[in-house]
Image (cartoon, coloured by chain):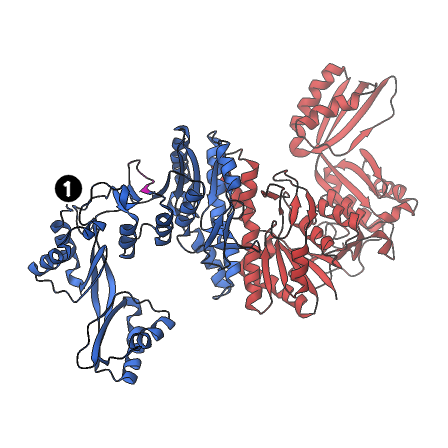
Chain colours: A red, B blue
Amino acid sequence: MKRVVQKFGGTSVGTLERIQATADIVERSVRAGIETAVVVSAMSGETNRLIGLAKALCEDANEREMDQLVSTGEQVSAALLAIELQKRGVIAHSYTGVQAGFRTDSSFSRARIMSVECDRMLERIGSGEVPILTGFQGVNEQGDVTTLGRGGSDTSAVALAIALKADVCDIFTDVDGVYTTDPRIVPAASKIDRISFEEMLEMASQGAKVLQNRSVELAMRYQMPIHLRSSFVDVPGTMVMNEDDIMERAAITGVAYNRDEAKITIKGIPDHPGIASALFGPIAEAGLNVDVIVQNVSEDGTTDITFTVPRSDYRQAMKIVQGICAEMKARDVKGDDNVAKVSVIGVGMRSHSGVASKMFATLATRGINIQMITTSEIKITVVLEEQHVNEAVKALHSAFGLDSEVIAA
Amino acid sequence: MKRVVQKFGGTSVGTLERIQATADIVERSVRAGIETAVVVSAMSGETNRLIGLAKALCEDANEREMDQLVSTGEQVSAALLAIELQKRGVIAHSYTGVQAGFRTDSSFSRARIMSVECDRMLERIGSGEVPILTGFQGVNEQGDVTTLGRGGSDTSAVALAIALKADVCDIFTDVDGVYTTDPRIVPAASKIDRISFEEMLEMASQGAKVLQNRSVELAMRYQMPIHLRSSFVDVPGTMVMNEDDIMERAAITGVAYNRDEAKITIKGIPDHPGIASALFGPIAEAGLNVDVIVQNVSEDGTTDITFTVPRSDYRQAMKIVQGICAEMKARDVKGDDNVAKVSVIGVGMRSHSGVASKMFATLATRGINIQMITTSEIKITVVLEEQHVNEAVKALHSAFGLDSEVIAA
């Protein structure tokens, strides 16, 4: 018998009408003879409402109490969905993190799942019931409620699917899958039928945030396929799965971009061991995120380092770097908060030579200057002026043969 | 060291401002060196909001799911109060029914507390923490959330006070105590400083519903004094306590009334064993509440029975009774939905003779006709025409010496 875990996000349970539509999907699965377990998020807006109440009392509220507070959001949506399903004659009950056996560590607001003790859930699902779990939450050793952090419901769903040995984890969302690139830029972008876990991780980190990376990492470790699909239309979405199970491979699976970048270049730093940590230590301590880092081979005993940060962190990072570089006697510090990242991604590039040269040539033909380059095994990223993003994405999408033949009107 | 359980109802945590005012009260107790544990209800209106969501999906929602749903209300208010107290440097944490060890049976929506496993709470309170418990809820053997029914937070507070061996259970509400009668009718009504558990039970059942009867019964069984007091002004309220601990005793403690009554009289029923159950069985099956029942001694082999029901149940009760009486060949059925109940209550009447005669004489002097009389050990109740309620209450309050000497302007 087939077994599936279905996960529904906040918009899928955001109103009573949406809860009914979600119940339609679950009921269809049950009537088709599939053993079905469900994971839900809080009704959209509810988590923010609760956080707002707490912040109005205290900006810096205790994290344990915040978790006790916000975890109620999923409890409400799970119970409502159970009530709607029972009305239809589907046996369904809701379970909180503690009831479902989601054991976590004690890092309130960003807990990690230690184990899923799913005996009760296995028994319920075996008896024909649809267990409906509150996503995003668990319980620590002391019996305190913990939450997994924003978007943690995806991770809950994957963890449950693994524990229940489900065939697949269906993640329902408001898009119908992962696209070869942003359809707003390239109307010929097409839905990717199958994507490997690693590609999905790279796509997500490039701003195509349809799935929390943590959930993809977990699914990859346990080889649990994720079916990312629309809760609005009943069509196949994108299967995120083991690379080996994907038959045909193009060199490139997708083109991703991120506009929200700023770069900082330090020129002429005396090149001796430890400069990188002297530079990036204070930036990390200030809680700033560093993305791409490029260091060229040194000349004359000095070197240049360039790195990028989210644009919102730019001013603060600049201030820190200027202080450090004065101490280090670097020659110059320059910044630019008008840059963007464009990447081509695909496990196929391991076996297809020439991806990099084709990428650079495509951009050169259009007179687009490449400011920085970094590569991983399955990704090549360039940093360029923000104004060139649309043209670069379109050109690369076409050059790597991703344009779909039929373009929707 | 003194130990107290403080219970706050929905209006005391109904807004962020009220939560702050409630935190003032808790903080004052802690700073005075009193070991303090707190029980809270849901923010006022929240339980109804949640029930409304469920009812919109399904009129007849599963009770287990309803309990999972509505129990979130207290979780929110408890966490918010903990956050506010921590801001002030008071160590405080919130605990759900399961975390606080409130074991109940499995009667969802009207569960009974089986035991309070309060090891963790004792440890927390001993370490200087203020544990803040979600009232109204517990957990059954399967780990399912249960609720105690409306007003169950009072019962939670008393049960916790008993388990923690507290000195007193403070119940904060929007009135400042129990009055000798309704001040809207008798401006000279005064606050009762001390009232026995039994008197409180009788007062409550007469419509003076400031405390849930179940909580008073529990307190009586374990001799746990309840201090019923205002959350708005810091003055002593009414102590509900063991009769033996109340020194001075007037004959009468208070005068209670209930306007919401209707009476039905069956005349000339053949008097043989089983008529009462033949009559009241079907009424109970229809879910109607019967209050006062009076049966006079029989004459001529027939008897008369009169009973009262809440006015809203009158028509349905009348219909049932007419059917039964036709079968029973009773002579006549009469009804009146324009009656009310007035009672004088006091443990002192056990030792003071003449309470009943004084009551009847007081009403007779004013030409008020008594339609029915019932008595218990500490209460005498009369049923009369509704139009006489105000005059009867005023006259009795004065006749039994309850009028306060100083009348507020």
Assign the N terminus of chain B to one quadrant of the image: top left
Q: Which residues are magenta?
A: B227-236
Residue B273 position in % (x across, y down): 29, 78
Nearer-the-camera pick, B100 or B90 = B100
Q: Main secondary structure of the magenta part?
A: loop
Nearer-the-camera pick, A66 or B322 = B322
Q: Residue at x 36, y 44 (%)?
A: B224
The residue beneath circle 1 is B407
Dividing the picture into quadrants, the one containing residue A23 is bottom right
Nearer-the-camera pick, A134 or B134 = B134
On screen, A307 above or below A75? above
Residue B232 position in % (x across, y down): 32, 39
Disc 1 crowd, CA 10 A, few/some/many (<14, 14-19, 20+): few
In the current view of this chain or complex, which residue is farthest to the left?
B365
A73 with respect to B150 (left or right):
right
Residue A53 seen = no
Dividing the picture into quadrants, the one containing residue A375 is top right
Residue B117 position in % (x across, y down): 51, 45
Residue B29 position in % (x across, y down): 39, 32
Circle 1 SS class = loop
Query: Is residue B233 found inside the magenta-colored segment of the image?
Result: yes
A372 with respect to A183 (left or right):
right
Q: Residue at x 40, y 46 (%)?
A: B158
Nearer-the-camera pick, A403 or A53 = A53
